[in-house]
Amino acid sequence: MTWWESAYRCGHVNWDPGEYDGHLPWLLDRFEIRCGRVIDLGCGTGKSAVWLAERGFDVVGIDFAPTAVRQAQALAQRRGVKVDFRCGEFPADFPAGSFGETDNALRLGAFDLAVERGFLQHFGRGRQLQRALRRIAQLLRPQALFYSLITAREGNRRGWGSSLWSEAEIRAAMQELFLIRYMELSVFTPGEAGSMPAWLSVMSPK
Ligand SMILES: C[S@@+](CC[C@H](N)C(=O)[O-])C[C@H]1O[C@@H](n2cnc3c(N)ncnc32)[C@H](O)[C@@H]1O
């Protein structure tokens, strides 16, 4: 069992905002994103994925914690929206071949938007991260956007060790595959008192 799965089972999920990511309304508005296919990477309990589906997006959510995925599916059912939630490890369980003819929903080059909040920051700085980034870039259409929210090292007094990132580290990690179109120091959970600083980036594939 992964650390994440045991956290979801115990309910010790301090990253979970209890609602969708509060930056999403700004993202849709600022980049005039009105419709299309979205993939939520490390979707957790699915609140952002469901919120996007309620706004008419065709959404796939991926997470490797079965408890989180079950909660996400139950939330979508309660709210009466269709979201394609998948339980599996990214990118290992989603190799290029499986995005092919047999799995139309996950085919490469088919997404208009990828979102991640607190997911990529746990992939380290090396090969594992680059593999994940390459797969994200492959999933996106040429004009698509990639929204990322990563807890910041700058101004952070609370720790979280290697999962804290500086602006320079994020720029260095992304530069080969993505063009950064917007970047600002925000917070991990808007509206939450004392929320951790976080780097909000909006990118497109190169
Ligand atoms: C900090 S939580 C954020 C969850 C959600 N994005 C949110 O904002 O509430 C990180 C999530 O990524 C998932 N995760 C981490 N590594 C993963 C991987 N390699 N493949 C799929 N899911 C992963 C965890 O199970 C967890 O749900």
Image (cartoon, rainbow, N blue to C red):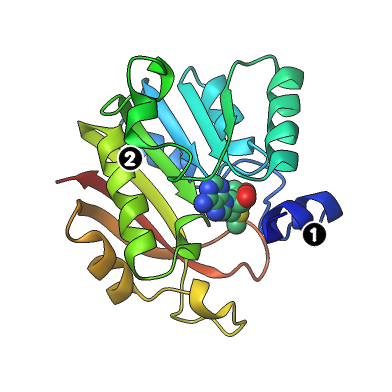
Q: Residue pushed farthest right?
A: 10
Question: In this orientation, which residue lies closer to the viewer: 97 or 85?
Answer: 97
Q: Quadrant of residue 144?
A: top left
**Helix, strand or loop for disc 1:** loop
Are there few (<14), some (14-19), or many (20+) residues within 10 Å of tag 1?
Answer: few
Question: In this orientation, which residue lies closer to the viewer: 179 or 30?
Answer: 179
Q: How many marks?
A: 2
Residue labelled with disc 1: 12
Q: Quadrant of the N terminus?
A: bottom right
Q: Is residue 167 above or below residue 145?
A: below
**Helix, strand or loop for disc 2:** helix
Q: Quadrant of residue 138?
A: top left
Q: Is residue 118 visible?
A: yes
Are there few (<14), some (14-19), or many (20+) residues within 10 Å of tag 2?
Answer: few
Residue labelled with disc 2: 30
Q: Is residue 149 above or below residue 153?
A: above
Q: Are marks 2 and 1 in contact (CB under 8 Å)?
A: no
User: At x 64% / y 37%, what residue is drawn?
Assistant: 47
The image position of residue 149, as x and y in percent, is 45, 56
The image position of residue 105, as x and y in percent, is 42, 19
